[in-house]
Image (cartoon, rainbow, N blue to C red):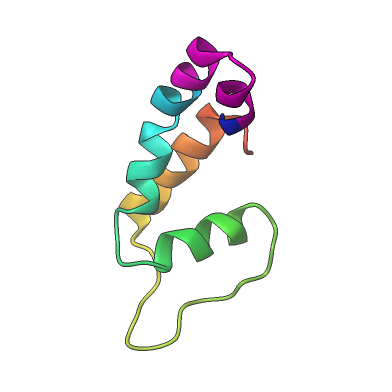
Amino acid sequence: MVHDFLNGNIEEARKFQLDSIPLINALFSEVNPIPVKEALNIMGYNFGTPRLPLTKLTEKNRDILISAMKDLNLL
């Protein structure tokens, strides 16, 4: 997105930003770093679970996260 913008491809950068909103919302659906760690785990990186007092991402939010990642071809 940044490269597109800096290279004058403003419309492409804008489109990517707007297309990313569901993923951004999913990554902020719970306290950081819970959704970020889960996204990395889903992608195959072994980041484990958050340390207490944080908990695992809820199933509902995990489903939303997976859907948003699929929409952006991250999975």
User: Going 49% across and 11% down the picture, which residue do you hit?
Assistant: 11
Total numbered labels: 0
Instruction: Indicate left or right for 15 with 21 as reference.
Output: right
Instruction: Indicate left or right for 38 with 29 as reference.
Output: right
Quarter of the picture containing the C terminus is top right
Q: Quadrant of residue 70?
A: top right
User: Going 32% across and 51% down the picture, which residue do you hit?
Assistant: 60
Q: Does the magenta stretch include residue 6?
A: yes
The front one of 53 and 11 is 11
Q: Quadrant of residue 17?
A: top left
Q: In this view, does 75 lie above or below 73?
A: below
Residues shaded magenta: 3-15
The front one of 6 and 64 is 6
Predominant secondary structure in magenta?
helix
Quarter of the picture containing the N terminus is top right
Q: Does the magenta stretch include residue 9?
A: yes
Q: In this view, does 46 lie above or below 70?
A: below
Q: Residue 61: x and y, percent? A: 34, 51
Q: In this view, does 25 lie above or below 35?
A: above
Q: Residue 67: x and y, percent? A: 46, 36
Q: In which quarter of the image is residue 32?
A: bottom left
The front one of 20 and 52 is 20
Q: Residue 43: x and y, percent? A: 65, 52
Q: Is residue 2 above or below residue 44?
A: above
User: Going 55% across and 30% down the picture, which residue do you hit?
Assistant: 72
Q: Residue 48: x and y, percent? A: 58, 75
- Residue that sits furthest to the bottom in the current view: 52
User: Going 33% across and 54% down the picture, which residue do you hit?
Assistant: 28
